[in-house]
Amino acid sequence: MIDKRLLRLSGTKKALLMLAGLTILQAFMILFQGKFLAQAIVNSWRLKALAWLYWPMLFFFSALLGRHLLNWLKNHVLDKFASQASATLRQQLLTKLFHLGPSLVAKQGTGNMVTMALEGIDQVENYMTLILNKMLNMMIIPWILLVYIFTLDRRSGWILLVVVPIVIMFMIILGFAARDKADQQYAGYQQLANHFVDALRGLATLKLLGISDQYADNVYQVSEAYRKKTMGVLRIAVLSTFALDFFTTLSIAIVAVFLGLALLNGQMALFPALATLILAPEFFQPLRDFSSDYHATLNGKNALQAVFAILELPQPQQRQALTAAPTWQANSQLTFTNVNVSYPGSNEADLAAVSFSVQGYHKIGIIGESGSGKSTLINTLGGFLQPQQGEIKVNDQVVPHLSQEQWQQNFVYLPQKPYLFHMSIAANIAFYQPDAAPAAIEKAASQAGLDDWLATLPAGLDTIIGEGARGVSGGQGQRIALARAFLDSQRRILLLDEPTAHLDIETEAALKETMMPLFDDHLVFFATHRLHWMQQMDYVFVIQQGRLVEQGTPAQLQKQQGAYVSLMTQMRGEPL
């Protein structure tokens, strides 16, 4: 019904205490409403003077106003708590994703992770807003009203008390069915997000291969399956609402029949009968509210569980072990000795016995066939993967892995397809430095070669891009990512994982002119399968099947006539 991990969030207990106090007061306001309304009707029935109606009606309207004022206060407290808690969750999720890196995104799916971080957190916020209020209303209000109803008419109290377990039993049965349907729906939602994002990002390649229509049909089939799952949830929701309304209406009718008979037989006064009849629907109202909103909270609960599943994944320990490299400098040194790395769940090493040593500012190219381990090495250098064996040294200090806070504050990571958020171009450039001055952002954009494109935009750097806004080409997206790197001049390590893999030759050539000045006074690890980049590299790593088989300057490797030359020949399509 409610995920207990929600109670571990900061501020939850304080918010619950405030809500519980306000809910108790609200319960008494409802009780006073019923009491004074019944009193006014009784006085009117007895044909008393208008003066006898003024005070009961004044108290009734005061209680009504107090009830709605308390409800507003509760919503205010909930909105503030849910907003802060969801913002904290989003920050924790993004931090976790940064620590675990691209391997987690590849496993979970880009669309799923983006959806979770954006829409998923919004659903969690809605879930917290609804579930806490409805739960407290259901746990407090009916029982305060029931105690008062017992003082008016025990028989009515017993009828209401007997019906409650029946209603709750049906709510539980239908709730389990709704939960299973909602779980299937959320899984379909994740699948749809992954299919759509992957197909959208690879649309140019799909059109080039002539299979875009096939993937369009694939997205349609997935969306149709999601629609059917959503309709299944709605069917359960309608059924549960009908069952709840039927039993609560039936119980109120039974109470009304017994009260009417008691009045006709002279066994009960008019006031307790009217007060009981007025409060009986209020007794069931929290249950009905909870049931009607329960299905609306299921997606939020599933999103919350998905977020917690990510947050509870193990992450590297000893992240403050590195103390020898506050900033990367010309005399800094990084050494790998027989390092073995495996992805989580893999039984074999994806990198085996990797050894190298680099010092200062160099441009290091990493080449190899697809699947050879280039991205694995980049992820290891970024601290996103941790070695199972071997030794890593930074400035002669041994560290268990490179997921060190100090190390990660020294590098900029540029993937194949940097994610652009739904915000202005300036905000995207300053995403990692939100306090950057406008002049610094303009300079970074200029250094990244964005001036000509920005000149065509009426709003310039203030143009909104990302989902649902202006489209951005692959080259423009990479330039925005480069501008992020230019903006942060303190980070002296660049990790590039095939940043030009999906660009045409002309765009890549133009981007290359922009990138080369960025490489100055930096330690650069550049994984690519584009051979022309090797001529700009100071040093080259050749990786085959997870092993670093050759390393050296391009000239040295050319003379050796080994794996480097063989790979270059193969990539050019020449006979071996």
Image (cartoon, rainbow, N blue to C red):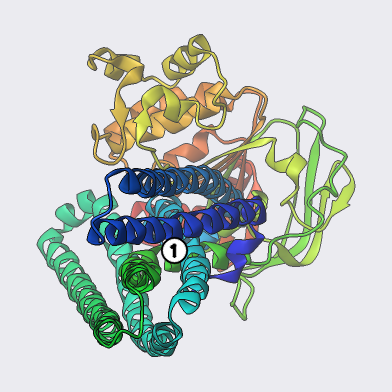
Please report the residue visible at 52 percent of the width from the left and 74 percent of the height from the top: 147
- Residue nearer the viewer, 32 or 434: 32
Please report the residue visible at 78 percent of the width from the left and 51 percent of the height from the top: 319
Query: On the image, numbered disc 1 is attached to which residue?
Result: 134
Point out residue 340 in the picture as x, y percentages from the top left corner: 71, 67
Q: Is residue 184 visible?
A: yes
Q: Residue 487's image quarter?
A: top right
Q: Which residue is the extreme one toward the top?
A: 439
Q: Is residue 127 visible?
A: no
Please report the residue visible at 70 percent of the width from the left and 30 percent of the height from the top: 361
Point out residue 90 in the picture as x, y percentages from the top left corner: 53, 49
For label 1, the crowd category at 10 Å Cα-Cα, with few meaning under 14, some 14 to 19 and many 20 or more, is: some
Please report the residue visible at 44 percent of the width from the left and 61 percent of the height from the top: 31
Placement of 262 over or under 334, stated as above or below: below
Tag count: 1
Q: Amino acid at mark 1?
A: Lys
Question: Left of 347 or right of it: where is 333?
Answer: right
Placement of 364 over or under 209, stated as above or below: above
- Residue nearer the viewer, 389 or 11: 11
- Residue nearer the viewer, 428 or 293: 293
Placement of 187 over or under 435, stated as above or below: below
What secondary structure is found at the residue carrying circle 1? helix
Q: Residue 542's image quarter?
A: bottom right
Quadrant location of the C terminus? bottom left
Question: Left of 360 or right of it: where is 273?
Answer: left
Point out residue 267 in the picture as x, y percentages from the top left corner: 35, 85
- Residue nearer the viewer, 28 or 141: 28
Point out residue 127 in the picture as x, y percentages from the top left corner: 43, 59
